[in-house]
Amino acid sequence: MPLLGIFLLFQTGSWISLLPPEAKKYVYLVTITCTIILPLLTAILLKNRGLLSSIFKPRGKERRIPLMMVSFFTLLAAFILQKVSAPMIFSLFLNGLSITILIAALISGFWKISTHMLGLGAIFGLILAVSLKWMIDLRLVLSIVSILIGVSATARLRLQEHNPAQICCGLLLGFLPLFILIRFV
């Protein structure tokens, strides 16, 4: 989801879209390295050490370790982008996402919140906040994300991976911090 959020920010038609190609490549590189490559390598290491039963679908309380790891690496990406003076919207997005992932990790110790909905809620919160803050018409993107939320929520319910409360809480936990952080900071 961090990569999707960064991609969507570059597609808003705002001043972010006008950044030089080298700057965009750097933001993508940091995002991919910190939010995909490093967490994946760490998960493989944890799996090989017997600390995770599965890389992509850890069970029960095992979810806490990968979520905390992803939260840390997302925070690292925000820190790196902030240090190179990238536009603040990127570090706000990544910091907000890191906070929501950390909260999900803490909740996962006793309840299985939907991280799929958390991610989609965060993307919806980001796009809605950017739309309102910068007065950009992003209704098409918001509609597409809304459809993805509905499809994903339905799939999670049909697969019996989550109950409605876990889905709603994941969606709200993803949406609220990102929307508030982006919209009002």
Image (tube, helix red, strand yellow):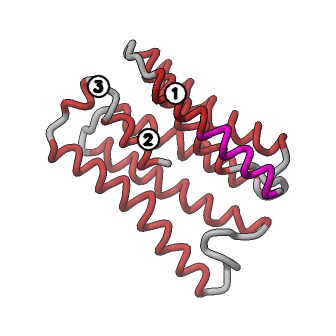
Question: Which amino acid, mark 3?
Answer: Gly
Mark 1, residues whose alpha carbon is within 10 Å: few (<14), some, or many (≥20)?
A: some
**With 61 as the anchor, is 20 left or right in this view?**
left
Q: Nearer the viewer, residue 149 or 83?
A: 149
Q: Which residue is mark 3?
A: 13
Q: Which residues are magenta?
A: 148-159
Provide residue 103's location: percent of width, then percent of height: 68, 46
Q: Nearer the viewer, residue 170 or 50?
A: 170
Give the mark, 1 or 2, whose residue is nearer the N terminus.
2
Q: Nearer the viewer, residue 167 or 33?
A: 167
Question: Which amino acid, mark 1?
Answer: Leu
Q: Which residue is mark 1?
A: 142
Task: Check if mark 3's residue and mark 2's residue have beta carbons within 8 Å.
Answer: no
Question: Which amino acid, mark 2?
Answer: Gly
Mark 3, residues whose alpha carbon is within 10 Å: few (<14), some, or many (≥20)?
A: few
Q: Nearer the viewer, residue 159 or 23?
A: 159
Task: Check if mark 3's residue and mark 1's residue have beta carbons within 8 Å.
Answer: no
**With 125 as the anchor, is 90 left or right in this view?**
left
Q: Would you say residue 56 sits in the magenta stretch?
A: no
Q: Which residue is mark 2?
A: 5
Give the mark, 3 or 2, whose residue is nearer the N terminus.
2
Q: In percent of the image, x 27 and y 38: which residue is there?
A: 86
Q: In percent of the image, x 46 and y 30: which residue is there?
A: 141
Provide residue 114's location: percent of width, then percent of height: 72, 49
Q: Is residue 160 above or below residue 133?
A: below
